[in-house]
Image (cartoon, rainbow, N blue to C red):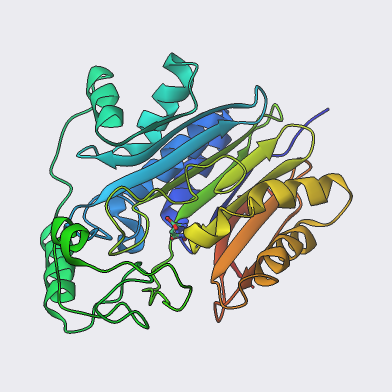
Amino acid sequence: EGFSPIAVNTWNFTNATEKAWSVLSEGGSALDAVEKGCTICEELQCDGTVGFGGSPDENGETTLDAMIMDGTTHDVGAVGALRRVKDAISVARKVMEHTSHTLLVGDQATEFALMMGFKEYNLTTDSSAKKFESWKNSSCQPNYWRNVLPDPKTSCGPYLPVETKMKHYKWFTAKEGKNFNVKNHDTIGMITIDKSGHIAGGTSTNGAIHKVPGRVGDSPIPGSGVYVDKHIGGAAATGDGDVMMRFMPALLAVELMRNGLAPDKAAETALRQIASYYSNFMGAVVAVTISGEYGAACHGFDKFPYSVVNSELKTVTVMNV
Ligand code: SD4
């Protein structure tokens, strides 16, 4: 039984799709395709939201989340809040291949990466330093705190380093506070299927801009950022990860396809589930069946472009939903 290779990823990150396709069309594996494809986005700093030099946290540091999943073995490797190493999805693959763990985080993920031969870099660039400075100097910074002084309604206030917040902020237990988030939501999430029918999923992101240091998003969480099952297909999610990871939309989309839903309907239903609790969340899901049907849905975005290539399309094509 022949499978027809396909690569699908979130957003119009076509260089990544192109790279994955070049691996697949040379007979390479789904895992290599997804790793190499996502790596391209890490190198190109796709939209400033993948790779080094993007989304500085409240201390100005860029940290990375990434995951890789092998749909044939159901093996997963992931890193969360990876510091000072650029190659997030490749480190995730080493976690999968050289440990029996699923997720390593923070400084110790960095130590693991260095042990595996990856190089240490400062992930700050002129551009991320500028974003941090202008956020710090604005009178009302969008941020992710809630129920906290000085203004519990918006969490607006003068910039304070996190240590100072810990000492001097007053914490509310009431649910009156509302966080005032920035919207920067451009993770790469990719599904690949190779000619032997192996399916793989990958994600890579620098997360949410101005996040509280230590924050890990949905992208390195299996079932949330991406999920693949050799019998059914795969799905990947992008968007407001703090909310989305509470619903495991990638897992849900795959399970809905198992029950016979088409990929676009499965994606839409997974997002509806989230919207029933968080009507204002922003997010999108792409989904693919093991036989190569694909589709996507979004919520809260005007439109959501995603990139696809298979042997019918021949060239990488951007679809819009
Ligand atoms: C996160 N989901 O860390 C990621 C951010 C993102 O498109 O861009 N998603 O919440």
Ligand 1 falls in which quarter?
Answer: bottom left
Instruction: Name the residue at 62% across, 70% down.
Output: 298
Q: Residue furthest right?
A: 260
Classify the position of the N terminus by image quarter.
top right
Q: Is residue 316 visible in this depiction of the protein?
A: no
Of 24 and 211, which appears nearest the observer? 211
Task: Please identify the quarter of the rendering in which residue 185 is found.
Answer: bottom left
Q: Report how many numbered discs are placed on residues in the image.
A: 0
| Residue nearest the viewer, comparing 149 with 11 | 149
Residue 202 drawn at (x, y percent): 51, 41
Residue at image x 42%, y 15%?
A: 98
User: In the drawing, does residue 224 fall left or right of residue 22?
Assistant: right
Locate residue 227: give its quadrant: top right
Q: Look at 45% across and 36% down and name the residue there.
A: 35
Percent x, y of residue 17: 50, 50
Asked if residue 159 is positioned above or below residue 87 in the image, the reply reads: below
Left or right: residue 190 versus residue 106 is: right
Q: Residue 131 vs residue 291: left or right?
A: left
Tell whether 194 sits left or right of 134. right
Q: Is residue 289 above or below residue 77?
A: below
Q: Quadrant of the C terminus?
A: bottom right
Kindly tell me whether residue 190 is visible in this rendering.
yes
